[in-house]
Structures are given as structure tokens and as C-alpha cells.
Image (cartoon, coloured by chain):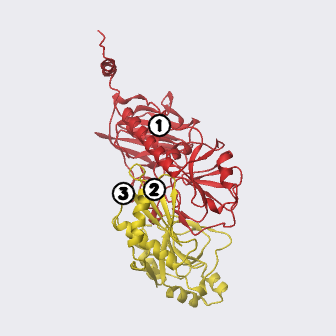
Chain colours: A yellow, B red
Amino acid sequence: MEPQFRAIADHALLVSFAAEISEDTHAKVVALDTAIGANMPVGVIETVPALVNLLVSFDPIITDHIVVEDHVRSCLKDMEVGQVSGVRRHVHVCYEAPLAPDLNAVATATGLSIDAVINAHLAGDFHVLMYGFAPGYAYLSGVPEPIQVPRKSAPVRDVPAGSVIIAGPQCLITTLTMPTGWSIIGRSPTAILTGDPNHPFLFDVGDHLTFERIDLTTFERLNKGNCS
Amino acid sequence: MTDAVFSVSFAGPLVTVQDAGRPGNMRYGVPASGPMDSLAYDAANAALGNLPGATAIEISLGGLMLQCKEGAVTLAITGGDFVVEHGAHKTSSWTVLTIHKGERLAIRAGKAGSWAYLAFAGSVESKDWLGRQATHSTSGFGGGALQAGQSLVISDAGIRDDRLGEIVQPDFTPEGPIRVVTGPQDHHFSAGAVERLLSEAYKVTDAYDRMGMRLKGPVLELDGALSIPSEPIVRGSIQVSGDGVPTILLADHQTTGGYPKIATVISCDTDRLAQFRAGHSLRFTSISSDHAIDDVRTLMGLKAQYLSQISVPRGSLAQRLMRENLLHGCVFD
């Protein structure tokens, strides 16, 4: 499919590569995001990469849909899909009680032992697809097929920040105390909201991520350093 | 200059610190936040001669009561038609007044409007996040929500006698239906759904906060696809959930989501939309994206002119007379 352009109100352009999610499509989103970011045209405020499309948000006093679309078309011509490899990030996770309330249920649902669920999760090659829902909520693809479970029928309230949660092929590390219908399989002391003004969010879309197991004592020691 | 210190005697829900917002972070799940009604917010700062984007307080229908504990400061109140009580003196929003140590100020829901703004001739001391003080209400990041019992410190508090009194209200706010550009998923709706959105009346419900405004009205049926791959959302996106009910996303919107969006409210109309209250009936009209650009440029021109007019100090009575005389080309003896 040729990229499709839709005008969003008076201040944004949505560039869509496909109707369905695929690795190839997401690679195009990341490539276009990188290409525009390397050469931000006058009046463009930001780009927002998602699963199958990219939003280009602009100041309508300075530019318009037609000018922005022309620029995007020239970026599309020059961009190299698959050239952006992203950085590999390492995130600590503790799978011990009381930090992993749904680990048992995931084991039961998948017919695996708890250790097998943990090992499968540790073996996953996770990929940052997009942010959404709340600040710092990075949607990660790459939950191995044997431990993919559907969302729970009802969300659970007040799930603590740092929870490592899964649903279907996706995984997420929460940054706020929020409700979730995903399965909570562990807790991470790694700060996604870094507090560093020059690099306030740990991941960029397109980054890869590996989980590293820690025990409860290590979790408690590392978690003390975080104020969130 | 010294500080003015207030204690918060009462603050309703969603009374928050806001500056002009933090655009540029949507890729990290962070909407711009900032004022729900940016025109009223800008007017409050302009009426005091503040720099655009100075930090102010956004007041919800819940209202706010302050007592001045130390110092004195001139402040501006704009937005909707709220009730303002300064000691025994009762007035309404769109006013500039000076509050002194020991005096009380109450700002309460009045005849119209959902959001009022309180700006100070001085700097509001508050936390910032990503370099801005605007509050993101769902996380509380930024300056945050005001709570009863806390103090509110205004540093470099100034007295601006030449700015006191009523603020001229903007007279260029468009009336009539809320303007939208259809899409991007209008094709996911059953035949007639877009037409229904553009021809029927919808009502604002009380499911209304800084994230969005849920409407009530004719159901907008989806054509099969109940969800789409999650994609970016903007302020003004009209998303439709599985039950066919539209919700307009506003200042603290989620940055991505999987509900189809039938249309997007243009930026010219989000300020007046935000001032509607539960029960208010509204209609939508569709315009092209080219037309939307023309409209926003016209409105921004009028807004700039208006803000520059109200930012001129009125001066003392003598100065005002002098100015009037000069303007009219004759001088009284």
C-alpha cells in the first residue's frame, strides 16, 4: 500500500503505511520519524510514531497540510527502512511475591511452570513500538508466544508504578499508579521517567529491550534510589 | 519586590497550576496539557502585562477560596462568567483587583463557563516537569492540583494600580456549530453516521474533565471495526467507543488510542467548546482542512490584536483622560 495522508483538523497530518500491524510497517514508521526528525521543516512541532502511522503536528500559522505533505513525500523517497536499529536497553525485573500477583494465573493459563513463564519472558526480545495511555507508558512487542495471555475480564485498580504487565504479544512497564487489565508478572526498579532533563524518558520508539532478573533484596535496594 | 503568600481555604477538584503547556512530548505519551480555554488564560496574563505563558491557576466549577497571609498582589480573573468575591465586594470574572494581607478571595461557578483563570502580577511558585509548570491532571505531574490547607506563594509580587477594573471581553469568539474536519477514520462508520454527527444535536454530559468530554446523542454506528491499531490522538479528536458514543479529547488527552475517530474539532473551537457545561446542547459542522487553516489564521490575528489592546495599562484617571483627549484630537480646559 502507498502511504496515505489524512489532514487532522488545522494542525496535523497523519501518514499511514498499512491498516494492520506488522514489523515491516512499524519499521517504515520509525524510518519516516527518523527522517523527519533529522530535518524538521519550519513550523513542525513534533512527530508522534505509532503502530502503523505517524502524526506530524504543526503550527498552522506558519505552515499547512500541503507544505508538510510535500516535505513528508520527499522524506519518504530518501528514507532507508530498517536502517534504524535503536539502542538496546536493559531493565531489571523481580518476579517474586508480592510483586508478581498474576504470575500464578499466567502459569495456569499457559500450562507452564512459573519458572518456565519467567524464563520465556526473560528470553523475549522486546521492541519499543510506541508510547500511549499515560506519560512514559511504552508499548513493547515481543512477548513470546507460549506466554501470551488475553487481557483480564475486569481491570484491577491501583496497580503500583514499575509493574511489568503483559497482554497478548505486548508488554509494558508502568510509570504511575493506575488501573490495568493486563497480567502483572513482576516489578521493575528501573526508572522509565529518568528525571534527567536531557533524556527524560528511558526509551525511544525503535529501541530494543532485554529484561534482567533480580531478587527481592536487590529490588528493594535499587528501588530505594527511586522517588517515583 | 516581596512575596505575596496565600493559604488555600478551599479548592474544588481540578483546580490546577497551568502555563501555556508542554508541546513536543507526545511521542513519550505526554499531551501538551495547558489551559482548557487558552484565550481566557492568555487574556488574564495580558491584562496584567505579564509575559505570554506565565503560570496561572485554572479554576474548575468546583471553585477556589484563598486568604492572603502576607504581602499584597494585583491579580486578574478571566474565563466564563464566574462569581468573584473579594471580601464583601462581589463581582464577576474578567476583572483585575489587588488583594492585601488579611483579605479573602473566592471564585465560584457563576452563570456560565466551566473554567476560569487566575493570573498574578508576579511568579507562581510551583513544581515543574519537563521544564513546564502545566499540570497533567491524570498523573499530577507539573505544578499539580491545589489542595485546601496548602500555601500558594507569589514571588516578586507587584501592585498594578494602572490595571485595575474590568477587562474587555473578546467579542470575536465564533458562534454557531463547532467546526470539525472529518476523519481520519470516517470510513470505519456505517453509512449515515457522519451525516448524523453533522446534522443532529449532541449534549455535553457530566463525564467531562481535562482529558475529554463525553457527549450524549444519536448513536454513531461503527462499520465492523470496533478498534483499529492504536494511533495518535490530538486535542479535539472525536473518538467513538464501541457503544457508538462520541467523546471529544481535550487538554490532557491520551496520546494514542484504538477507538476510531470520526472527526476532529479545529483548534479555533476548542476554547469555546471547553467552556460548555453538562447539559449544553451543541451541533457540529464540517469544513475542509484548507478552510480550517484560513479560519485559524484569521482567529489568531484577531486574538493577537485583542491581547495587545487589553495589555495596555489604563493608567490613572488623569492619564486616561489625557489619552482619550489626545486620541480625539481635542483638549478640555
The answer to whether residue A163 is seen in the rendering is no
Total numbered badges shown on the rendered structure: 3
Cα gap from disc 1 to disc 2, whole angstroms: 33 Å
Q: Nearer the viewer, residue A156 or A57?
A: A57
Viewport quadrant of the C terminus of chain A: bottom left
Residue B106 coordinates in the image, percent (x, y): 50, 36
Q: Nearer the viewer, residue B329 or A220?
A: B329
- What amino acid type should be assigned to the residue bearing mark 1? Thr
The answer to whether residue B217 is seen in the rendering is yes
| A167 sits to left or right of A70 | right
Disc 1 and disc 2 in contact, CB within 8 angstroms: no
- What amino acid type should be assigned to the residue bearing mark 2? His
Residue B326 coordinates in the image, percent (x, y): 30, 19
| A97 sits to left or right of B154 | right
Q: Nearer the viewer, mark 2 or mark 3?
A: 2
Mark number, residue B78: 1
Name the residue beneath numbered marker 3: B131
Q: In the image, are marks 3 and 1 on the same chain?
A: yes
Residue B242, compared with residue A20, is above or below; it is above
Dot 1 alpha-carbon crowd within 10 angstroms: few under 14, some 14 to 19, many 20 or more: many
Dot 2 alpha-carbon crowd within 10 angstroms: few under 14, some 14 to 19, many 20 or more: many
Disc 3 and disc 1 in contact, CB within 8 angstroms: no
Residue A71 coordinates in the image, percent (x, y): 39, 62
Q: Nearer the viewer, residue A101 or B92?
A: B92
Mark number, residue A65: 2
Residue at 45%, 75% (x, y): give it: A189
Residue at 38%, 60% (x, y): give it: B130
Subunit that carries the residue with mark 1 = B
Q: Secondary structure at mark 3?
A: loop
Residue at 37%, 49% (x, y): give it: B125
- Quadrant position of residue A208: bottom left
Viewport quadrant of the N terminus of chain A: bottom right
